[in-house]
Image (tube, rainbow, N blue to C red):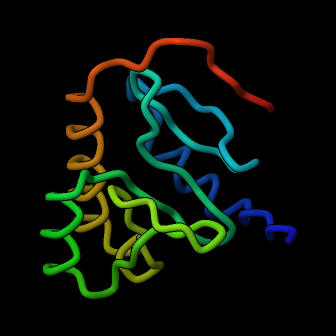
Amino acid sequence: MEWKKSSEELVKFLDGKMTGRKAERRKMFGFPCYFINNNMCTGTFEEGLFLRLGNEGREKAMVEHKELSYFEPRGRKMGEYVVVPREIREDAANFDRLLELSIEYVSGLPAKKGKRQTRE
């Protein structure tokens, strides 16, 4: 199954939101993603944008924002992650708050060690 490439608009949106952050841009699943201490934080997947909030943060966010959904590439749920729909991305205050929660959560995780496998 071939995935649809993320739009330039979506990639630019995420790049703009991550400018100046202590995060490394890499590709995961062939899509641009950002990592903090080698832990994936956020990225695009097809026409979606996902954030890593942790299990507790994800649950709280999904109660507050019914529009959020689980991130499920290839039908496999990634438990700590949510997909942020366009209506939330267009609401700068809500999106920025969710992004800050993601960055805060991932920044608190232990740094991953080992070989980094990236393909750009």
Q: Position of residue 23 (x, y in %)?
A: 44, 27
Q: Position of residue 6 (x, y in %)?
A: 72, 63
Q: How many marks?
A: 0
* Residue found at x 38% / y 66%: 82
Q: Position of residue 32 (x, y in %)?
A: 65, 45
Q: Which quadrant would the N terminus be assigned to in this image?
A: bottom right
Residue, far bottom: 66
Residue 104 in which image quadrant:
top left
Residue 85 in which image quadrant:
bottom left
Residue, far right: 2
* Residue found at x 44% / y 60%: 78
Residue, far top: 114
* Residue found at x 69% / y 24%: 117
* Residue found at x 59% / y 74%: 75
Front-most of residues 62 and 115: 115
Relative vertical location of residue 99 with respect to residue 114 in this rendering, above or below? below
Relative vertical location of residue 23 with respect to residue 84 in this rendering, above or below? above
Q: Is residue 5 left or right of residue 19?
A: right
Relative vertical location of residue 114 with respect to residue 33 in this rendering, above or below? above
Q: Is residue 23 left or right of residue 33?
A: left
Front-most of residues 94 and 30: 30
Q: Which quadrant would the C terminus be assigned to in this image?
A: top right
